Amino acid sequence: MKKAELVRATLRRFPHVPKKTLAKYLITQYPTLFVNKDGQTDVENARDSIRYYTKAKGMPHAKSLSDENYCPHEAKFPPSIMPKRTPYIMKPGLWLVMADAHVPFHDVKALECVIEYGQTQKVNGIFLNGDIQDCEAVGFWPVIGKRDFNLEVELTIDFLDFLRNEFKGKPIIWKPGNHEDRLKRYYTNNAPQLANLPEAEMEMILSLESRNIEFLGYKQKVLFGKLPVLHGHELRGGNANLVNPARWLFLKAKTIAMCSHFHRVSKHEERTLNKKDIVTWTTGCLCSLEPDYNPEANNWTHGFSLINLESNGEFEVENRRILENGKII
């Protein structure tokens, strides 16, 4: 938008505000448009523009300004700043779905079981469904011990490098969950001027591009053909004490769906009036089952899933649980 249009739009929006106050507003919102001869942002430059478009600069200027140019222009329908959310479309194949490792609070034995199982099944790719890095050090909640984000980064990188080595040449797709979102919120709350820098993004910190790991958008829905997959926090609500998280997912999604987030292996089935079968799944976690903030009776279970996606969008889900002795059921 041109400088003249901005000034006239501001006069239309705030007709009751004094000229100097409007000038301060303009240089705050558009600092590069109102500069003096030295190239510095100047409130008097903005104030001079306001006086010009209100015919307050005197007769010579007023005569050169037509009533059409003077009058604040008509309001246009405002554009939306809401980004369009485009689902990520997974390619056909057999996918190993892992979630909620919460590195550095991961369970080594459970992860070893999953990786070994994925290798024996000859999966075509890995899908990381959120909360792979815990980001405790930049979280809101109080912690026991020292916050050490650098250590979290190093151990997460080591895990990713190990995963990449075990599945050479296989695609690894990472959908961030609410714990990865902690980093973005930390910047927004504590260093907002850095929040949108490329260097502040998790994929930059973890060098994911060089590791050939694709990092998806926050809260981006993923489609395994006809199966929508979320981390789980996108739907809001729910808690760790749900009797059946998959039933909660059904009530929220109202369609076939899968999510993680609840650290529980669960399944729920419904049949509609027009004889359509709807199934929802939640996957288990791969982190310690005894976190400091809730070490006992949390009902968490270790687990993962396999999704066999066909080219026509049909799919088959194996939602597996890992027992304490390492047996997969």
Image (spheres, grey):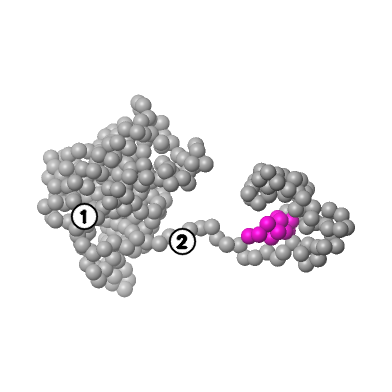
What SS does tag 2 mark?
loop
* Residue 270 showing in the rendered view: no
Q: Residue furthest bottom?
A: 274
Which labelled disc corresponds to residue 29? none
Q: Pointer 2 and pointer 1: residues touching (CB < 8 Å)?
A: no
The N terminus lies in quadrant: bottom right
Residue at image location 47% in from the left, 46% down from the top: 196
Residue at image location 71% in from the left, 56% down from the top: 7
In percent of width and height, residue 95 lies at 22, 57
Q: The residue under label 2 is which amino acid type?
A: Lys
Left or right: 206 in relation to 41? left
Q: Nearer the viewer, residue 325 or 105?
A: 105
* Residue 291 showing in the rendered view: yes
Q: Nearer the viewer, residue 29 or 296?
A: 29
Q: Nearer the viewer, residue 142 or 276?
A: 142
Q: Residue furthest right?
A: 59
In percent of width and height, residue 33 lies at 65, 51
What SS does tag 1 mark?
loop
Residue, disc 2: 84
From which residue to which does the magenta span run?
1-13
In percent of width and height, residue 115 lies at 17, 47
Q: Is residue 108 magenta?
A: no
* Quadrant position of residue 100: top left
Does the magenta stretch mainly form a helix, a strand or a loop? helix
* First in residue order: circle 2 vs circle 1: 2
Residue at image location 45% in from the left, 39% down from the top: 186
Q: The residue under label 1 is which amino acid type?
A: Lys
Residue, disc 1: 170
* Quadrant position of residue 181: top left
Whole-Å distance between the Cαs marked 2 and 1? 29 Å
Q: Is residue 9 magenta?
A: yes
